[in-house]
Amino acid sequence: MNTMRKPLLLLILLLALLATILPAQAESFQAVVAVDSMKVYSQKAPYPCLGELPRGTEVTVKGYNGSVALISVGGKSGLAQVSDMTLASQSAPAQTETPSRTMTTNRDTRLYRKAKKSSKYAKVSAGASVEVLAVKDQCAKVSYNGKVGYMVYSHLDEPGSTPAAEPIDTAADDTPVQTGSAPVAAKTLTRVYASASLTGESIAVNKGSKMTLLAIRGDVAMVEKNGAIGYMSLSDLEHSTAQTASAGKGNPFPADSNEHVIYAFMVGEMGYNRAAAMGVVANIKFESGYRPVCNGDGGTSYGICQWHAGRKTNLINYCTENSLDYTTLEAQLKFFKYEITTRYSGVHAYLKGVENSADGAYDAGYYFCFNYEAPAARTSQSTKRGTYAKDTLWPMK
């Protein structure tokens, strides 16, 4: 017998056995696809494959036995391997990480009783040590001073790591946030604070000191200088260049901003049309806020595209071999071109052929997210980024 057929034959035997005993559970429960592609089989002999579900798809498990489960999604049922899924919980929407690990709060934050910002909370100071029990998307289930609750995951760092630079987020504050990047300078001698509350630890900055403006909430500005992130009063800043309007043919982003450089690279160096370029820019906005020094996922992801784990290593190795500084935007864009034209050539080909229209911008944003970035909650994130490319970026002049 061909040994390559043994796993398939074993699965068919399990499916045949399972068809007589499912459901094994009295109550159904939710699970999430934990592999890149999960095959779903018919409940009837000869158990043909009905199709595949992508990573992050939530399904209802009606019963299971051994290594096979009866699942339901979109009103349709089928059989799948238990090992291809992980548990999901609506009350504590977190995917268990084993073992738990100690992390440190990188700003003043809050410990919520439930996985909702509208629930009751306790204040937690920057630098506090917490035990992370589980993580899903931006929700972290933690243990702090004997209490179990929930925190914003981006407010946590590995001990001793450089704090991840995130857009201003003052927890339950619903004040709109403006994000992007622009060159600014201090109007006068002033101070930059570690907290968005503009209290506590701070350093003095001289008049004329140049920085990059990353985000604004109300009268608070989030700024960056040489990779360090801080907060200061917006009224203490001014543009460091008089040129803030769009520059460059067809480039709608502010001159000297990172998004201006990224868009120009996508159109000029990559040869993408406007729709494809907007799709990529939309993803980079959600991944890093256009910041090349952005750390994520507890320090395992880095850069404008949040290259994760082995891809982060590939970025560093590529830059080292080509005498580039991997922390710079220029180096990361060069690596982007290398990676997408070699390891993700299918994505590159799709972007090259996308229709140059608002719908094309949506398609580019969705496809790039789903197939290149591949974040958690892949389908909902792809929809969100495609919509942003179509409704927000495409109309820009």
Image: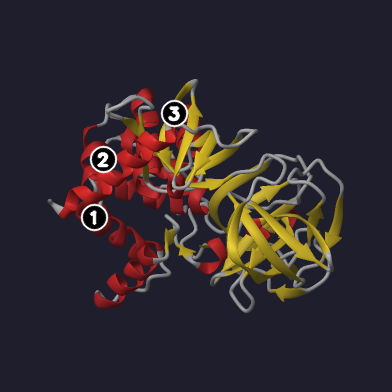
Tag in front: 3 or 1? 1
User: Is 90 left or right of 294, judged from the image as shown?
Assistant: right
Asked whether 168 or 232 is in front, the reply is: 168
Q: Is residue 39 visible?
A: no
Say whether disc 3 or disc 1 marks the residue closer to the N-terminus.
1
Residue sitting at x 30%, y 62%: 335
User: Is 180 left or right of 364, judged from the image as shown?
Assistant: right
Asked whether 128 or 196 is in front, the reply is: 128
Rounded to the nearest angstrom, the CA distance separating label 2 from label 1 is 18 Å
Asked whether 36 or 163 is in front, the reply is: 36
Residue 292: % across, % down: 46, 62
Vertical relation: 248 (above or below) 52? below
Q: Quadrant of residue 164?
A: bottom right
Asked whether 2 or 190 is in front, the reply is: 2
Residue 343 is labelled as 1
Task: Specify the quadrant that holds the C terminus.
Answer: top left
Q: Which residue is mark 3?
A: 390
Which residue reaches farthest left? Answer: 1
Residue sitting at x 75%, y 40%: 175
- Crowdedness near tag 1: few (<14), some (14–19) or many (≥20) residues, C-alpha within 10 Å: few
Q: Which residue is mark 2?
A: 272
Vertical relation: 270 (above or below) 213? above
Q: Quadrant of residue 364?
A: top left
Tag in front: 2 or 1? 1
| SS for dot 3 | helix
Say whether disc 2 or disc 3 marks the residue closer to the N-terminus.
2
* Residue type marked 1: Arg
